[in-house]
Amino acid sequence: MDRYPVLKPVEEALWSAYGILEACYMGGGKLLVAGNGGSCADAEHIVGELMKGFVKPRRLPESFQERLKEEGGKQGEILAEKLQGALAAIALNGHPGLSTAFANDVDGDLVYAQQVWGYGNPGDVFLGISTSGNAKNVDYAVTAAKAKGMSVIGLTGKDGGVLGTRADVAVIVPEQDTFKIQELHLPVYHTLCLLLEERFF
């Protein structure tokens, strides 16, 4: 918070969000993330930080390195050297074939909910990103996630909107304009990713 004092009011919510994510990964779960527009790009950004090294090299366990070498010889040596530890995360906006098929055949507002139903399990986490907190497709996904026994984290702004009231933890950054909200979302999720990497690697 030293670099972003404007985020001091959300520090407690940020730590609560971290606690949910820590428990998820300790239990072998995964994170599902979704948003629209700039928040869609943020969802992909988050997955990129979790699924490979962020600021740490994340070497694979020695036992798995040996299994790779036994299985693949020279190829296994390359994998053992270059693969990195990952925290399982999926950006739901990254599946255009499925998304366009479901939108065309069924209902575009339910695309994220369909993926939460298909990918989610009890103990997993759904992270919905919406600058207003009122994105309809994100809200449908929240309902699906809660019905599946998943925890829900909201990352939003303004007054939090519907997402702010429905999420188990909502990080509502103190801005009103969309672009300013997005500018504050980045240090929030970078902090979460850094904390998780420190904890697990």
Image: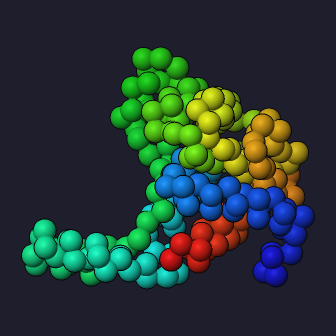
Residue under the point 56% across and 26% down: 110
Horizontal arrangement in the rendering, residue 26 relative to residue 175 (left or right): left
Q: Residue furthest left?
A: 73
Q: Is residue 190 visible?
A: no
Q: Quadrant of residue 60?
A: bottom left
Q: Is residue 127 above or below residue 84?
A: above
- The one nearer the camera, 183 or 127, is 127
Which residue: 41% across, 41% down? Answer: 95
Q: Is residue 50 left or right of residue 128?
A: left
- The front one of 8 and 181 is 8
Picture quadrant of residue 168: top right
Name the image quarter holding residue 183.
bottom right
Whether residue 108 can be seen here: yes
Residue 1, image x and y in percent? Answer: 81, 76
Q: List x then y, in percent, for residue 106.
A: 47, 17
Residue 163 position in % (x across, y down): 76, 39
Compared with residue 126, is residue 47 higher up or lower down, i.e. above or below? below
Image coordinates for residue 116, horizontal then vertical, percent: 53, 36
Q: Is residue 63 above or below residue 14?
A: below
Q: Which residue sits at x=82%, y=53%? A: 172
Q: Residue at x 38, y 80 (%)?
A: 59
Left or right: 84 with respect to 71?
right
